[in-house]
Image (cartoon, rainbow, N blue to C red):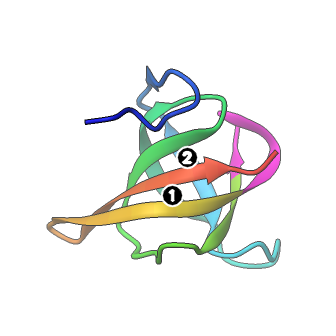
């Protein structure tokens, strides 16, 4: 398998807060990170997202709220979803 990542991923388990769109007035949801890099992160959430969806990260992991794009998602059962994000800088 060819590695497509631009930056090395680092394991990190922390709470991440996000809005399901780029509108700052939207509800803030929570997830738990699995890993992160300069360009993206992977987290688990109980809220379904769609590939290509833009979300607003509101977490100390990503200083100053940043827009991210859902690159992939997977239903991992029990109402949980694993999500891969690309951070827009």
Q: Say which residue appears at 41% left-offset and 62% top-offset.
A: 72
- Report the magenta stretch's main SS: strand
Q: Is residue 64 highlighted in magenta? A: yes
The residues colored magenta run: 58-67
Residue 14: say if magenta: no
Quarter of the image for residue 1 reads top left
Using the rendered view, name the quadrant where residue 12 is placed.
top left
| Residue bearing the label numbered 1 | 30
Whether pointer 1 and pointer 2 mark residues with C-beta atoms closer than 8 Å, the reply is: yes
Q: Residue shown at 66%/70% (left/top)?
A: 54
Residue at label 2? 16
Q: Earlier in the sequence, mark 1 or mark 2?
A: 2
In this rendering, the answer to whether 25 lies above or below 74 is below
In the rendered view, tell whether residue 35 sits above or below residue 42.
above
Q: Position of residue 74 (x, y in %)?
A: 28, 64
Q: As drawn, is 80 to the left or to the right of 73?
A: left
**What is the CA distance from the residue labelled 1 to the residue labelled 2?**
6 Å
């Amino acid at each position: 398998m060819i590695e497509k990542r631009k930056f090395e991923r680092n394991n990190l388990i922390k709470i991440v807060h996000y809005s399901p769109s780029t509108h700052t007035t939207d509800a803030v949801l929570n997830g738990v990170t699995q890993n992160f890099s300069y360009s993206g992160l992977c987290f688990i959430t109980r809220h379904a997202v769609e590939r290509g969806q833009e979300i607003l990260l509101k977490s100390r992991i990503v200083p100053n709220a940043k827009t991210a794009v859902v690159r992939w998602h997977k239903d991992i059962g029990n109402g949980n979803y694993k999500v891969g994000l690309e951070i827009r800088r």
